Image (cartoon, grey):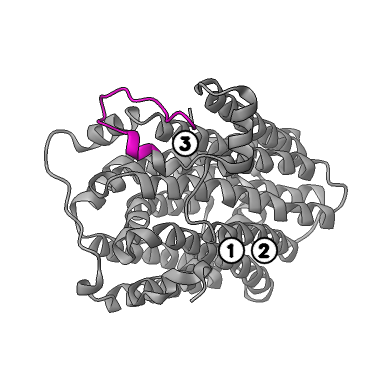
Amino acid sequence: MSTMFQSLGNRSYRLWAGGSLISNIGTWMQRMAQDWLVLTVLTDHSGTALGVTTGLQFLPVLFLGPYAGVLADRNSKRSILLWTQTAMGFCALAVGLLVVTGAAQLWNIYAAALCLGLASAIDGPTRQAFVSELVDNDQIANAVSLNSASFNIASLAGPALAGLLILWIGTGPVFLLNAASFAAVLVSLGRIRGADLIPFIPAARRGPQVAEGLSYVRGRPDLALILITVGVVGAFGLNFPITNALMVTSEFRLGPGELGVLSSLLAVGTLAGALLSARRATPRFRYLVVGATGLGTFTLIASISPAFWVYAVVLVPVGLSAMTFLNVCNTSIQLSVSPQLRGRVLALYLAVLQGGTALGAPLMGWIGTEFGARWALVTSGSAVVVTGVLTLIIICRRSPLTLRTQFRNILTKGPNPADCAKNHVSSTSGVDLPAEVS
C-alpha cells in the first residue's frame, strides 16, 4: 500500500476511519445549518450572535479539557468515545426536533452549543489519543494526517450537501441527518476487536493528575512554544465559519449555496495539506512557521478580494496553510510525549486551540458586525502573521548557531520536533530546546 495510506492496512484503523468519515460529514452539515439558522432565521445577520454560538461550543474545553485528558490516560478510550458520541448525537436530535416543529429560539441554540461543547471537550483528547492504540508507533504520524484528511473530506462534502439541503428542505432536517450519522461511528467502535488494540498502561494515580500534565509541559519548552502559538492562531486565525458567513451575507449578498461553496473550497486546501502531511514521516518546525505565516498572509489577501470567486479561490491556500500548521503541532505531540501523559498533553493542546477559538470567535463576530467582514479578516491575518514571525524569532534567538545557518535549517531542512523528547530529562529539569531547534 502507498506510504500515504499505509495506516489503512490496519483493520481497526480502517473501521475507525470509515465511521468517523460518515459522522464528520454529518457534523459539517450541522455546522453550516447552525450558522445559517442563527444568522438568517433567528437574528438579522448578527455576527455577534454567531460568534457567541461558536464561543459557547468551544468554551467548555477550557475548563474540562485538562480533566478529560486525565480520563483518557486512566480509562478505556473506546468506552469514553461510545458515551461522548452518543451524547453528541442526542444534542443534534434535540435541536433538529425543535427546528422542524418551529419551536427553536436563539437561547435554545446557545444551550445546545454549550451541551455539544461539554461532550466535545471530553471526546476531543480521547479521540486524538485513541489513534495511538489503533496503529503502531511508526504509523502514528501517517494516521494523524489521514485523520485530518478524513475530517477535511467531510468538510468538503458536508457544507456542499448542507447548502443544497437547506434550500430544499430547511435547516431542521440537516440536524436530524447529523444525529443519524453518529450511528456510523458507534457501529465502527463496536466492531473493533479489543485484542487488536495496542495495550496501554493506565496513568498511575499519584498526586494531582492535571498538575502533572502542566508540569510536564513547563519542562518542555518545545511543547510550550507550540501551545502558545496554537492559542494565538486558534483565537484569531481559525474563525472561518464566522468570517465566511459574514462575507457571503454582508459583503457579497449571496445565499447558503455560496456559503457551502466557500466551505468546500476551504476544505480543498485543508485536504491537500493533510495529504501532503501524510507523506512526511516526521514533522519539522519549518512547516509550523511556514504554515502560520502562510495562513496569515493569505487571510490578508482574502480581505481585499474584490469578488466572490476571487475570495473563494484564495481560501484554498488558506486551508492548506492552516492544516500544515495544525498537523505539525498535533503530530509533534503524538510522537514526542510518553503514552502515560499523551492524553493530558493532547487535552491541553485542544484546550488551548479550541479555547482560543472560543475567546476569539465573539471578538471576530463583533468586529465583523461593527466594522465589516473585511476588517475581521484584516485583524485575523495580521495577528497570525505577527505570531508566525515571533515564533521564528524565538526559535532563532535560542540557538547558538549563526542567523544564516538557523534560517537555512528552519526554512530548508528544519528540525524534527519529535527529537525534543530525546533531550527531555524530567518535568523539572529546566532542559532547553535542542541546539538545532532553540
Image location of residue 128, percent across then percent down: 37, 55
How crowded is the residue under tag 1: few (<14 C-alpha within 10 Å), some, or many (20+)? many
- Of 431 and 312, nearer the camera is 431
Between the residue at mark 1 and the residue at mark 2, the CA separation in whole angstroms equals 6 Å
Query: Is the residue 254 above or below the residue 235 in the image?
Result: below
- Of 169 and 327, nearer the camera is 327
Secondary structure character of the magenta stretch overall: loop
- Residue 348 magenta-drawn? no
The residue that appears at 67% across and 68% down in the rendered structure is: 163
Q: Label 2 near label 1: C-beta < 8 Å?
A: yes
Q: The disc labelled 2 sits on which kind of residue?
A: Ser
Tally of numbered tags: 3
Which region of the structure is painted magenta? Answer: 420-436
Say which label, 1 or 2, has the lower sequence index: 1
Image location of residue 138, percent across then percent down: 37, 60
Say which label, 1 or 3, has the lower sequence index: 1
The residue that appears at 29% across and 43% down in the rendered structure is: 344
- Of 174 and 342, nearer the camera is 342
Q: Secondary structure at mark 3?
A: helix
Which circle marks residue 349 in the picture? Answer: none
- Of 348 and 141, nearer the camera is 141
Q: The disc labelled 1 sits on which kind of residue?
A: Ser
Which circle marks residue 155 in the picture? Answer: 1
Q: Which residue is mark 2?
A: 264
Between the residue at mark 2 and the residue at mark 3, the CA separation in whole angstroms equals 28 Å
Q: Which residue is mark 3?
A: 226
The residue that appears at 37% across and 49% down in the rendered structure is: 335
> In the picture, residue 171 is in which quadrant?
bottom right
- Residue 433 magenta-drawn? yes
> In the picture, residue 7 is in which quadrant?
bottom left
